Image (spheres, rainbow, N blue to C red):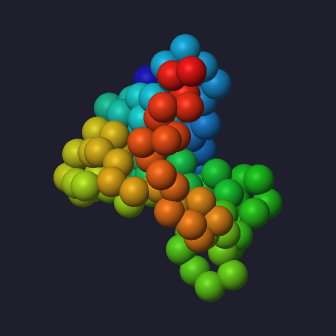
């Protein structure tokens, strides 16, 4: 936490990306919570997982943003993550390559 606070204070670009496999898809949500606990605003934490991550990978404008020409992968939430970063867990709809994903089927396939 201290390192994240220091890096944030030094205006170092933060990037979220976890390899915590045992949390079954919750790792990035946990990481966002920790970034906010370390002093980033919810918006800064969301940028760490989207536009900052895309820029770090050299994919700015294609990933991590909503814009013409960008890859159409979106997560639509039921609650505002700027109010509470834990709202990223309240997923309403997932869109992959511009197509709505059947969330029930996706969740069922993970349990097999």
The part of the image, by quadrant, that contains residue 15 is top right
> Viewer-proximal residue, 53 or 110?
110
Residue 10 x, y percent position in the rendering: 53, 45
Residue 64 coordinates in the image, percent (x, y): 59, 62
What residue do we see at 40% from left, 57% from top?
93
| Depth check, front residue: 29 or 92 | 92
Q: Residue at x 36, y 34 (%)?
A: 33
Q: Is residue 81 visible?
A: yes
Q: Quadrant of residue 30?
A: top left
For the point 42% across and 42% down, which residue is it? 104
Which residue is depicted at the point 70% across and 60% down? 55
x and y percentages locating residue 35 in the rendered image: 42, 36
Camera sees residue 85: no
Residue at the extreme top: 22
Locate residue 4 relative to residue 52 in the image: left or right: left
- Left/right placement of residue 76 relative to residue 71 reads left
Establish if 39 lies above or below 45: above
Compared with 97, 5 (above or below) is above
- Could you tell me which quadrant the N terminus lies in? top left
């Amino acid at each position: 936490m201290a390192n994240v606070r220091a890096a944030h204070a030094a205006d170092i670009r933060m990037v979220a990306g976890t390899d915590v496999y045992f949390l079954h898809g919750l790792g990035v949500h946990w990481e966002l919570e920790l970034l906010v606990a370390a002093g980033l605003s919810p918006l800064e934490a969301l940028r760490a997982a989207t536009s900052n991550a895309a820029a770090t990978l050299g994919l700015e404008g294609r990933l991590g943003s909503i814009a013409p020409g960008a890859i159409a992968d979106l997560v639509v939430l039921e609650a505002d993550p700027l109010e509470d970063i834990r709202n990223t867990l309240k997923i309403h709809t997932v869109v992959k390559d511009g197509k709505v994903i059947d969330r029930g089927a996706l969740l069922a396939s993970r349990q097999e």
